[in-house]
Image: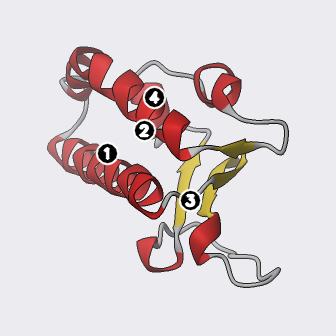
Amino acid sequence: MGADLYLLAKRKGNNQITGFATDLNVGYFRDSYNDSSLFWKFELSWWQDYGDLLNKKGNLSPKNAVKVLELLKNNEKVFEANLEKCSPDDKKYFIKKYETLKSFLNEAINLKSEIESSI
Protein backbone atom coordinates (compact mmCIF):
# COMPACT_ATOMS: atom_id res chain seq x y z
CA MET A 1 0.00 0.00 0.00
CA GLY A 2 1.06 3.54 -0.58
CA ALA A 3 0.30 6.95 -1.97
CA ASP A 4 -0.12 6.87 -5.75
CA LEU A 5 -0.08 10.24 -7.49
CA TYR A 6 -0.92 10.81 -11.16
CA LEU A 7 -0.61 13.99 -13.22
CA LEU A 8 -3.99 14.31 -14.90
CA ALA A 9 -2.39 16.21 -17.81
CA LYS A 10 -0.36 13.08 -18.64
CA ARG A 11 -3.01 10.46 -17.94
CA LYS A 12 -4.22 8.72 -21.11
CA GLY A 13 -7.81 7.52 -21.01
CA ASN A 14 -8.55 5.08 -18.22
CA ASN A 15 -5.17 3.35 -18.36
CA GLN A 16 -3.94 2.36 -14.95
CA ILE A 17 -0.25 2.39 -14.14
CA THR A 18 0.74 -0.75 -12.30
CA GLY A 19 3.83 -1.68 -10.35
CA PHE A 20 5.84 0.22 -7.84
CA ALA A 21 8.18 2.32 -9.98
CA THR A 22 8.05 6.08 -10.07
CA ASP A 23 7.89 7.21 -13.66
CA LEU A 24 7.85 10.94 -14.35
CA ASN A 25 7.55 10.26 -18.09
CA VAL A 26 3.98 9.12 -17.55
CA GLY A 27 3.28 11.51 -14.68
CA TYR A 28 3.35 9.03 -11.81
CA PHE A 29 4.85 9.13 -8.31
CA ARG A 30 4.53 6.49 -5.58
CA ASP A 31 5.46 6.58 -1.91
CA SER A 32 4.89 3.35 0.02
CA TYR A 33 3.52 3.20 3.56
CA ASN A 34 6.58 1.53 5.06
CA ASP A 35 10.18 2.32 6.02
CA SER A 36 10.84 3.52 2.47
CA SER A 37 8.26 6.32 2.82
CA LEU A 38 9.71 9.70 1.93
CA PHE A 39 6.82 11.57 3.56
CA TRP A 40 7.44 9.76 6.82
CA LYS A 41 11.08 10.92 6.79
CA PHE A 42 9.66 14.45 6.88
CA GLU A 43 7.34 13.30 9.71
CA LEU A 44 4.37 14.18 7.51
CA SER A 45 1.20 12.21 6.94
CA TRP A 46 -0.25 11.41 3.53
CA TRP A 47 -3.69 11.20 5.17
CA GLN A 48 -3.59 14.39 7.20
CA ASP A 49 -1.00 16.83 5.85
CA TYR A 50 -1.53 15.92 2.18
CA GLY A 51 -5.10 14.65 2.38
CA ASP A 52 -6.36 17.89 3.91
CA LEU A 53 -5.30 19.69 0.71
CA LEU A 54 -7.33 17.51 -1.68
CA ASN A 55 -10.50 18.75 -3.36
CA LYS A 56 -13.84 16.89 -3.31
CA LYS A 57 -12.71 14.70 -6.24
CA GLY A 58 -9.63 13.63 -4.31
CA ASN A 59 -7.29 15.65 -6.50
CA LEU A 60 -4.55 18.09 -5.54
CA SER A 61 -4.75 21.43 -7.34
CA PRO A 62 -1.61 23.11 -8.71
CA LYS A 63 -2.13 25.82 -6.04
CA ASN A 64 -2.05 23.17 -3.33
CA ALA A 65 0.95 21.47 -4.95
CA VAL A 66 2.78 24.68 -4.03
CA LYS A 67 1.61 24.17 -0.44
CA VAL A 68 2.98 20.62 -0.42
CA LEU A 69 6.35 21.95 -1.61
CA GLU A 70 6.20 24.49 1.23
CA LEU A 71 5.39 21.73 3.76
CA LEU A 72 8.39 19.75 2.58
CA LYS A 73 10.67 22.81 2.62
CA ASN A 74 9.51 23.72 6.13
CA ASN A 75 10.31 20.19 7.36
CA GLU A 76 13.73 19.82 5.72
CA LYS A 77 15.52 20.00 9.07
CA VAL A 78 13.41 17.06 10.30
CA PHE A 79 14.20 15.21 7.06
CA GLU A 80 17.92 15.85 7.46
CA ALA A 81 17.86 14.70 11.09
CA ASN A 82 16.08 11.49 10.09
CA LEU A 83 18.59 10.90 7.29
CA GLU A 84 21.39 10.94 9.87
CA LYS A 85 19.92 7.69 11.22
CA CYS A 86 20.08 6.05 7.77
CA SER A 87 22.78 4.10 6.00
CA PRO A 88 24.68 5.93 3.22
CA ASP A 89 22.71 4.02 0.56
CA ASP A 90 19.40 4.88 2.21
CA LYS A 91 20.42 8.56 2.41
CA LYS A 92 21.07 8.57 -1.35
CA TYR A 93 17.73 6.83 -1.94
CA PHE A 94 15.73 9.38 0.06
CA ILE A 95 17.55 12.40 -1.36
CA LYS A 96 16.88 11.15 -4.90
CA LYS A 97 13.24 10.40 -4.05
CA TYR A 98 12.85 13.91 -2.60
CA GLU A 99 14.24 15.46 -5.79
CA THR A 100 11.85 13.29 -7.81
CA LEU A 101 8.84 14.38 -5.75
CA LYS A 102 9.79 18.04 -6.08
CA SER A 103 10.13 17.62 -9.86
CA PHE A 104 6.76 15.88 -10.00
CA LEU A 105 5.03 18.65 -8.02
CA ASN A 106 6.72 21.38 -10.04
CA GLU A 107 5.64 19.70 -13.25
CA ALA A 108 2.02 19.72 -12.02
CA ILE A 109 2.37 23.43 -11.23
CA ASN A 110 3.94 24.25 -14.61
CA LEU A 111 1.34 22.21 -16.54
CA LYS A 112 -1.47 23.62 -14.38
CA SER A 113 -2.47 20.02 -13.86
CA GLU A 114 -4.36 18.55 -10.96
CA ILE A 115 -2.82 15.48 -9.33
CA GLU A 116 -5.12 12.50 -8.93
CA SER A 117 -4.27 11.12 -5.51
CA SER A 118 -4.92 7.65 -4.22
CA ILE A 119 -3.80 7.76 -0.61
Q: Residues within 10 Å of mark 4 (few under 14, many from 20)?
A: some
Disc 3 secondary structure class: loop
Q: CA distance from mark 2 to mark 1?
A: 7 Å
Viewer-proximal residue among 106 and 117:
106
Q: Could you give the CA–CA distance between mark 3 and mark 2, rounded to whole angstroms?
A: 22 Å
Contact? badges 2 and 1 (CB < 8 Å): yes
Q: Which residue shows up at 59% across the image and 21% down it?
A: 49
- Report the residue marked by disc 3: 113
Which residue type carries mark 4? Lys
Q: Nearer the viewer, residue 97 or 9?
A: 9
Tag 2 residue: 38
Point out which mark residue 98 bears.
1
Q: Position of residue 107 (x, y in %)?
A: 40, 60
Q: Residues within 10 Å of mark 2 (few under 14, many from 20)?
A: many
Q: Residue at x 65, y 66 (%)?
A: 8
Circle 4 sits on which residue?
Answer: 67
Question: Dot 4 lies on which element?
Answer: helix
Between tags 3 and 2, which lies in front? 3
Q: In what element is the residue under mark 1?
A: helix
**Mark 1 neighbour density, 10 Å: few (under 14) some (14–19) many (20 or more):** some
Q: Nearer the viewer, mark 2 or mark 1?
A: 1
**Are discs 3 and 2 less than 8 Å apart at CB?**
no
Q: CA distance from mark 4 to mark 3?
A: 15 Å
Name the kind of residue labelled 2 in the image: Leu
Question: What's the amino acid at mark 3?
Answer: Ser
The mark that comes first in sequence, 4 or 3, is: 4
Residue 92: x and y, percent? 19, 49
| The quarter of the displayed image where residue 12 is located | bottom right
Q: Are marks 3 and 1 in contact (CB under 8 Å)?
A: no
Q: Are marks 4 and 2 in contact (CB under 8 Å)?
A: no
Q: Is residue 40 above or below residue 102?
A: above
Image quadrant occupied by the C terminus:
top right
